[in-house]
Image (tube, coloured by chain):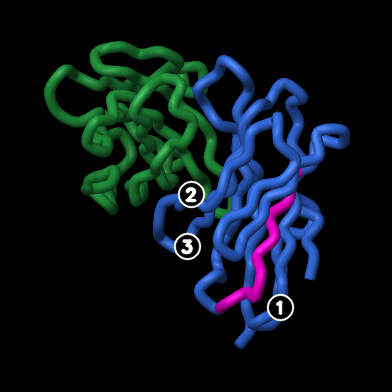
């Protein structure tokens, strides 16, 4: 399944399928990006990050892709599990600034 | 290594009262950030502090809100004369240095104003 980020805030996938969550960022000067996972009632949890000099970065079951031309970021989760159910936020940071700007999030529902 | 700690986890105040939210950063971290999150929304930056200094408070309302990070003790976000619109989750994050990119978040304080 694929989410179009801010325009489709909820993504439902079957357990075992791959998930793709998209995010459009606004500032071409942003040089660092993080994907956070937030479970209900908890704080954001770091998943994976990527710098603007990279196009792709892989972690355990997760991959982040960065397309600077169209200012687009995506998070791919392989073999989605029920424990992946949460809200996922992308966060961008502009060079020389210390604060992150968060998207509004995409809720991922994993059906067993 | 303990993570970022926040207390209280839940805080209920009546309109006009004061709310004090505390944040203890991760061990070795001297940079603290406060964010606010309304239901079904992303986090909004409020303020960035180092020990005894406010570095960036561009996201903090000019009135009623203040923050500090003293030499000893936790960082405090203080909201005076709370109104219903202040009801939100307030998250604190910390990082070890100014240029350390990743910010690690605490569990948040959920403020409810009656």
Q: Are marks 3 and 2 in contact (CB under 8 Å)?
A: no
Instruction: Give the percent coordinates (x, y) of residue B2.
Output: 22, 48
Q: Residues within 10 Å of mark 3 (few under 14, many from 20)?
A: some
Residue A17, label in figure? 1
The boundaries of the magenta stretch are A73-81
| Disc 3: host chain | A
Residue highlighted by disc 2: A46
SS under mark 3? loop
Residue B70, label in figure? none
Residue highlighted by disc 3: A39
**Chain B drawn colour:** green
In the image, residue B108 lies in the stretch drawn in magenta: no
SS under mark 2? strand
Q: Residue furthest bottom?
A: A112
What is the letter of the blue chain? A
State the residue at coordinates (50%, 74%).
Answer: A83
The answer to whether A64 appears left or right of A2 in the picture is left
Question: Is residue B14 at all visible to an observer of this figure?
Answer: yes
């Amino acid at each position: 399944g694929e989410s179009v980020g801010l325009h489709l805030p909820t993504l439902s996938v079957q357990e075992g399928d791959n998930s793709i969550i998209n995010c459009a960022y606004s500032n071409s000067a942003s040089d660092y990006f993080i994907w956070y996972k937030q479970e209900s009632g908890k704080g954001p949890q770091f998943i994976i990050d990527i710098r603007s000099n990279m196009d792709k970065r892989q972690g355990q079951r997760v991959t982040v892709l960065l397309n600077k031309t169209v200012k687009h970021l995506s998070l791919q989760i392989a073999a989605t599990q029920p424990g992946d159910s949460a809200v996922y936020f992308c966060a961008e940071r502009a060079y020389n600034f210390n604060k992150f700007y968060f998207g509004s999030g995409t809720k991922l529902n994993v059906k067993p | 290594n303990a993570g970022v700690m926040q207390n209280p986890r839940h805080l209920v105040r009546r309109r006009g009262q004061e709310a004090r939210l505390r944040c203890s950063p991760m061990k070795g971290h001297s940079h603290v950030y406060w964010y606010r999150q309304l239901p079904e929304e992303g986090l909004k930056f409020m303020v960035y502090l180092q020990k005894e200094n406010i570095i960036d408070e561009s996201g903090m309302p000019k009135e009623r809100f203040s923050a500090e990070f003293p030499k000893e003790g936790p960082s405090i976000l203080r909201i005076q004369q709370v109104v219903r619109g202040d009801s939100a989750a307030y998250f604190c994050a910390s990082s070890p240095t100014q240029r350390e990119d990743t910010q690690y978040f605490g569990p948040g304080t959920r403020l409810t104003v009656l």
